[in-house]
Image (spheres, rainbow, N blue to C red):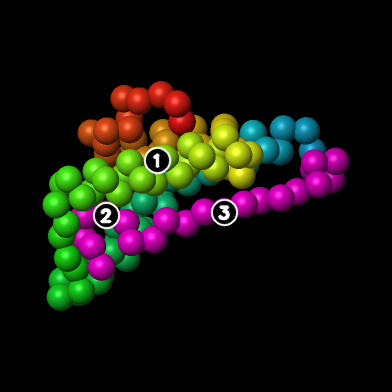
């Protein structure tokens, strides 16, 4: 496993029947998710820290940036294709940038 990039990127797709939920459900769900981000990242860090060093491998800063660019391009493509929700993608970008403000994507628009 790499110790300086995520090994797993989790994507969730929630498909609902809007008429079966109260008005504002999607917005409330996003707000709830935002409130859970700090707790979730703390849990992820705790779990990552528990992985023995012998299983970790560092990759260069250049390789990390290449992975981040690749992931960003795919997120943009999926959003344009209607697979990802644009509002949720904004929430997730804010989450990534709140954890690591120096990410190259934090100063870019288009996502």
Q: Which is in the foreground here, disc 1 or disc 2? A: 1
Q: Mark 3 points at which residue?
A: 12
Q: Nearer the viewer, residue 106 or 42?
A: 106
- Magenta highlight range: 1-21
Say whether residue 110 is left or right of residue 68.
right
In the depicted structure, whether residue 104 falls above or below residue 41: above
CA distance separating discs 3 and 2 = 20 Å
User: 53 or 21, which lies in front?
Assistant: 53
Q: In which quarter of the image is residue 45?
A: bottom left
Q: In what element is the residue under mark 1?
A: helix
Distance CA(mark 1)–CA(mark 3): 17 Å
Q: Name the residue under label 2.
A: 5
SS under mark 3 = loop
Q: How crowded is mark 1: few (under 14 residues within 10 Å), some or many (20 or more)?
A: some
Q: Which residue does the image show at 81% across and 47% down from the upper left?
A: 17
Q: Residues within 10 Å of mark 2 (few under 14, many from 20)?
A: some
The answer to whether residue 14 is visible is yes
Labels 1 and 3: the sequence-earlier one: 3
User: Is residue 17 positioned above or below 103 on the image?
Assistant: below
Query: Disc number at residue 72?
Result: 1
Q: In which quarter of the image is the N terminus?
A: bottom left
Whether the magenta-drawn stretch holds residue 54 is answered as no
**Horizontal relation, residue 10 to residue 31: left or right:** left
* Residue 41 point in image, percent of width and height: 36, 51
């Amino acid at each position: 496993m790499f110790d300086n990039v995520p090994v797993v990127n989790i994507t969730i797709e929630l498909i609902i029947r809007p008429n079966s939920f109260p008005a504002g459900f999607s917005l409330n769900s996003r707000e709830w998710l935002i409130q859970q981000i700090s707790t979730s990242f703390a849990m992820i860090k705790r779990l990552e820290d528990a992985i023995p060093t012998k299983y970790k491998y560092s990759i260069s800063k250049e390789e990390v940036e290449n992975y981040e660019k690749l992931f960003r391009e795919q997120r943009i493509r999926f959003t344009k294709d209607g697979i990802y929700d644009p509002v949720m993608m904004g929430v997730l970008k804010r989450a990534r940038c709140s954890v690591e403000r120096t990410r190259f994507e934090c100063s870019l628009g288009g996502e």
